[in-house]
Amino acid sequence: MNHGTVNTAKGMPPGKSKAIRSRSLPSSRPYTIAVFFSVLHYFGLIATVTAFVLFFMEPSQLASKVIIFGIGFSAVSWLIAFFKRRAAHCPLCKGTPLVNSGALAHSKATRIVPFNYGVSATLSIIATQRFCCMYCGSDFDLLKTPSHLRAQTDEDYEE
């Protein structure tokens, strides 16, 4: 008896592929803007932490000014990034996948372990230009052309 093969003779279909096609977004602009300001915020945090380390290694007036500027820049960039991430909505469920609202996440939603789902989606967009909505579990690709625009380009090629 062979336990590793699927018996298609008895009418059992083979298993479906686990790969799921990503959806396109009607407009990736809100996500691009939100991720841009989030990256600025992350750079501000890195600069501030670096200035703290340099200040504790060798205290100087310049390092203290960089720390103060870094804290102010991080606060302002966080505020802008928060509102821009809040403005990016999922086209299917109308949720805000880049900001956690405290709602229960979908079972297919993924996250990077020390971070929440919103930060994980933001980091995923930075690294791969794709994200998974934490509320409906749909995968989206920012680089994929929307279907209504693909139909127009196909007609242009036929002429």
Image: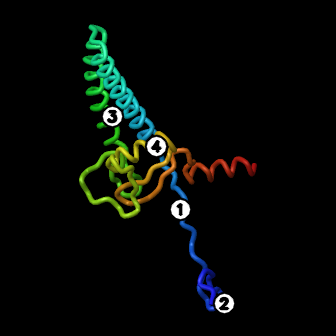
Q: Are marks 2 and 4 in contact (CB under 8 Å)?
A: no
Q: Residue furthest top?
A: 61
Above or below, comparing residue 93 to residue 13 in the picture: above
Q: Residue furthest front?
A: 57
Give the mark nearer the N terminus: 4 vs 1. 1
Task: Give the amino acid at mark 2.
Answer: Ala
Q: Which element is circle 3 on?
A: helix
Query: What's the CA distance linking mark 2 and mark 1?
Result: 27 Å
Q: Circle 2 is placed at which residue position? A: 9
Task: Give the amino acid at mark 4.
Answer: Ile
Give the mark nearer the N terminus: 3 vs 4. 3
Nearer to me, 77 or 65: 65
Query: Residue 117 appears at what percent x and percent y?
Result: 34, 50
Task: Give the amino acid at mark 1.
Answer: Ile
Query: Residue 27 appears at what percent x and percent y?
Result: 47, 44
Q: Which mark is residue 20?
A: 1
Task: Give the amino acid at mark 3.
Answer: Ala
Q: Which element is circle 1 on?
A: loop
Q: Is residue 101 left or right of residue 7?
A: left
Q: Are marks 1 and 3 in contact (CB under 8 Å)?
A: no
Query: What's the CA distance linking mark 2 and mark 4?
Result: 44 Å
The residue that appears at 57% across and 48% down in the rendered structure is: 145
Q: Circle 4 is placed at which residue position? A: 125
In this rendering, the label closer to the viewer, 2 or 1:
2
Q: Circle 3 is placed at which residue position? A: 81
Q: Residue furthest right?
A: 159
The residue that appears at 48% across and 52% down in the rendered structure is: 140
Q: Which element is circle 4 on?
A: helix
